[in-house]
Each structure stands twice: as structure tokens, then as C-alpha cells.
Image: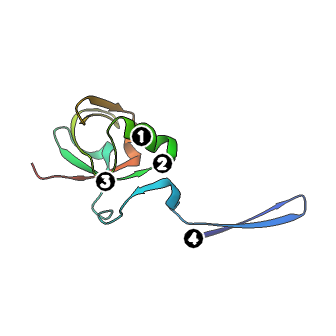
Amino acid sequence: MVAIENDLQGQSRQMTLAFPPTSLVEGDGAADAAALPLAEVPVGARVRVTAVLGGKHLLRRLGDLGVRVGAEMAVINRRGDGVLVRARGPVVALGGGVARKVLVLRLEA
């Protein structure tokens, strides 16, 4: 928790924020200790999405692509932090910024 005080034109307001903001995290948190960003997973690995660290627009966009909490995917290719994954049929390309926000668990081969 972080408390932030803001003094605008003599008005003092205080906000308390929890990190990570719970409204921006989707997932159960049960396996967060072993979870790693999708950007760090090697080619050929099978993974299960455990959390997505992002706002509602990112969650909706990824969900439309089949990348949602509980989904199993295979990493097809990587370039830098960007990845190609097969999720729910089609191959999906995710840039490095998005791939770092998708937390996954590696599945046994």
C-alpha cells in the first residue's frame, strides 16, 4: 500500500493504492511464485496463462485472441521479447511489452 497526498490549489486529497492494483490484475494468484513473463519462455514450451497485468482494454483484446487466464498455449517463435503463440487455434503475435504482462506457468512436455 502506498499513500499519496496531492495538494492542488490549497486542497489536500489523499489516495491509497495497492500494488499491483487489483483492478488491473486478472488471475487467481495461486501460482504467482512460479509464474514468469511470457517474454521469457523458450520456443517449443507449452504454458498456461496464470495472470494478465493490464487494464480492461488489454484484457479484452487478449481475450478476443484466446489469450486469457487458464488458456494453454504453445510458444512457436520468438524475436527479442516478442513471441508467436498458438492459442485457441490461430497463431497470435504479441509484442514484447504485452508478452511481459502475460504471466504463465510452464507445463510438462
Mark 4 or mark 3: whose residue is earlier in sequence: 4
Find residue 36 and name its label.
Answer: 3
Looking at the image, do the residues carrying marks 2 and 3 touch, with CB atoms under 8 Å apart? Answer: no
- What residue sits 57% from the left and 70% below the top? 1
Q: Secondary structure at mark 3?
A: strand
Where 94 falls versus 68 (above or below)? Answer: above
Q: Secondary structure at mark 4?
A: loop
- What residue sits 51% from the left and 41% below the top? 57
Find residue 1 and name its label.
Answer: 4
Q: Nearer the viewer, residue 38 or 28?
A: 28
At label 3, the amino acid type is: Leu
Mark 1 or mark 3: whose residue is earlier in sequence: 3
Looking at the image, do the residues carrying marks 4 and 1 touch, with CB atoms under 8 Å apart? Answer: no
Q: Foreground mark, 1 or 2?
A: 2
Where 106 falls versus 67 (above or below)? Answer: below
Q: Nearer the viewer, residue 71 or 109?
A: 71
- What residue sits 33% from the left and 34% below the top? 80
Looking at the image, do the residues carrying marks 1 and 2 touch, with CB atoms under 8 Å apart? Answer: yes
Q: Which residue is mark 2?
A: 54
At label 4, the amino acid type is: Met
Mark 1 or mark 2: whose residue is earlier in sequence: 2
Find residue 98 and name its label.
Answer: 1
Mark 4 or mark 1: whose residue is earlier in sequence: 4
